[in-house]
Amino acid sequence: LAALPPAAAPASGGTLILLGVTSALSLLSAGASGVAFDLEGSGGALVRGEVLAAVSLPDWESKGPAYLAAMNRAGQLSRASEALASEYARVDSTLAAAVAASPETGANSAAVLLIVRTPSGSASGLLQGVLSLAATGARVVSFDLSLVP
């Protein structure tokens, strides 16, 4: 995981999070409908969020068709506060820098930006965000997310 704004969100849900993930060809191949986003509390219970888009880094940088569809689907990115909009704007360059530093061949085409929406009714505190393949349940990426009351 190369980038994650915001790292904290209201527990009421509905917050859009933009994730920049390296080496995530499986997420990109599955597409938004094939990826599950869950928040896991300390008791292990999962609360399902929503994956709005999965866009390759090259498509994001060129503002290609998948990028345009993602922006259409996640119109709230444009209504973010000035500070959050600035964080969102740095995700692709942060991801591109992580890819450039990678020794992996083809790392650029395996990098993906995902837009997810946090679920409502989640407990507050530090939770584990999980991106998994919907078909198999295989966890691909885990990250910490702080939910505040």
Image (tube, rainbow, N blue to C red):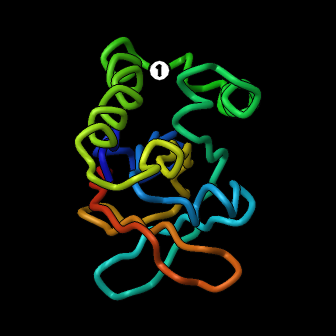
Across and down, in percent, residue 115 comes to 55, 43
Which residue of the protein is positioned furthest toward the front in this rendering?
A: 105
- Based on the displayed image, in which of its 4 quarters is residue 89 positioned? top left
4 lies left or right of 39: left
Which residue is drawn at the image coordinates 29% and 50% (left, top)? 148
Across and down, in percent, residue 122 comes to 45, 64
Q: Nearer the viewer, residue 39 or 3?
A: 3
54 lies left or right of 2: right
As drawn, 146 above or below 99: below
Which residue is drawn at the image coordinates 40% and 75% (left, top)? 40
As drawn, 134 above or below 125: below
The N terminus is located in which quarter?
bottom left
Q: Which residue is tagged 1?
A: 80
Q: Crowdedness of circle 1 by 10 Å Cα count: few (<14), some, many (20+)? A: some
Across and down, in percent, residue 79 comes to 54, 17
Q: Nearer the viewer, residue 81 or 148?
A: 81
